[in-house]
Image (cartoon, rainbow, N blue to C red):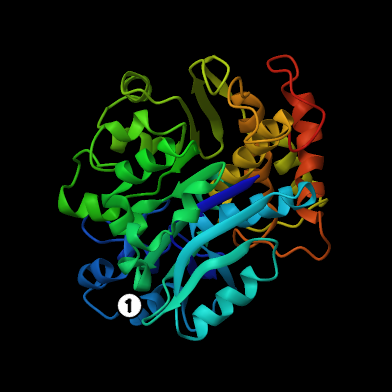
Amino acid sequence: MRIAGAGCAVADFLYADVNFEGEAFLRFRSRRRGDGGITPGGLVFVEEFEEFAGMPFKEAVRWIVGSREPDSFNLGGPAIVALTLVAQLLAPRGVEVEYYGVRGQDDAGARLLDIARRTPLRTDGYEAVEGPSSFTMVLSDPKYDAGRGERAFLNAMGVSAGFGPEDLPDRFFDADVVLLAATALVPRLHARLTDLLKKAKERGCVTVVTTVYDFRSEKANPGAKWPLGESEETYACTDLLIADREEALRISGERSDREAYDYFKDNGLSAFAITNGPEPVWLYSREGLFRECPLSPLPVCRAVGEAMAAGEKPTGDTTGCGDNFAAGVIASLAAQMMRGGSGRGVRDGLHLAQAVAAGVCAGGSACFHLGGTVIEKTPGERAREIGELYARYREQVRDACRLSAEFPA
């Protein structure tokens, strides 16, 4: 089995323990939609932030964090972070997981490739091009929102701005599963998302789309509906959409959760999983590739908080929770498909709740680490860590949902 994904890879410079209620942060906090200020849970591009701040980016960051260096440098970006964990979880089963994107010919690009090569992820499609590597300054406040924690993101698009559909080789569409992740951070892919999904479906791929805060659309039309591809046909070509609640509302253009869910169903979306931080995940699937699952919630994994409170696990931050969630979902879907034996595997009756349960535990596990990408000390380390959470989660939801004892399954 092969899984291929495209989207951005960025250098994550993470600052932990930033006070989002402090005077320094509030000075640069957004006052209205799309104004270029920083927002807890939101992403803003460096150029717009500098215009809002009225000073160079580095100077503004020094106001917020002082003179200290970042707490960590890590491989970031919704596409490559998710695919890295998928590769770690499925390596023992012989699954090839490939990332397609670009990095700059600079020190950051070299460091990113070095991290990626220390994982089972295939990086043949991760090419070096002239220009600066994309980066994200991640500001994390673990005490925000009554201790639930949140991050704010400052992104420089760098070489990702030039990556487009013509940079995806034919081999990309020969995969069993294709992931197009957070393409709003890769504008040329985002503009052709519908065409890319059509081509993938024509080649028999299972298609997964994940979203991200679309600051470019918000800047252009504050409060308006965010486009996802060239037309609403995007949804009919998408087998599974993974988004957080705010992104689901904004790309649907609806005002309530239920209206957003109805919008996706009415436009032919096969399945979706909508996250909302520490609140339950809402999932839905129509019969076909997936078995029918009426709109229903699954809670987050309470064992995550219990493990940190008891000192069983270190406290990291929430960076990468959404990307790790997507990885758990995809790994479970692939494991289910592989039960079909030879060829391209099972093509109907996949169990969405089973996949979302794996995603919940994978996403929760990111709270034990700084940043979204974790380098394993020994092969299978991530699968064991998440599998322990999954065993406890299976007990947590046993009255509402029957889950396999195997992980990922």
Coordinates of residue 15 in the picture (x, y in percent)? 53, 69
Give neighbour class at mark 1: few <14, some 14-19, many 20+ (Cα, 10 Å).
some
Q: Is residue 157 left or right of residue 276?
A: left
Q: Nearer the viewer, residue 18 or 58?
A: 58
Residue 80 point in image, percent of width and height = 54, 59
Q: What residue appears at the point 33 percent right and 55 percent down from the top-left corner?
A: 189
Residue receiving disc 1: 57
* Occupied quadrant, residue 186: bottom left
In this view of the protein, which residue sits in the foreground, 329 or 302? 329
**Can residue 145 be seen at all in this image of the molecule?**
no
Residue closest to the eye, 200 or 386 = 200
Question: Which quadrant would the N terminus be assigned to in this image?
Answer: top right
Quadrant in which the C terminus appears? top right
Q: Is residue 350 above or below residue 63?
A: above
Q: Quadrant of residue 115?
A: bottom right
Looking at the rendered structure, the kind of residue marked 1 is Phe
Looking at the rendering, which quadrant does residue 354 occupy?
Answer: top right
Q: Secondary structure at mark 1?
A: helix
Res. 193 in view: yes
> What residue is drawn where x is 60% and y is 46%?
327
Residue shown at the point (36%, 49%) measured from the top left? 213
Residue drawn 34% across the image and 76% down it: 60
Residue 236 vs residue 94: left or right?
left
Q: Residue lying furthest left in this view?
A: 221
Q: Position of residue 289 (x, y in %)?
A: 54, 23
Disc count in the image? 1
Q: Residue 117 at what x, y percent from top left?
A: 66, 71
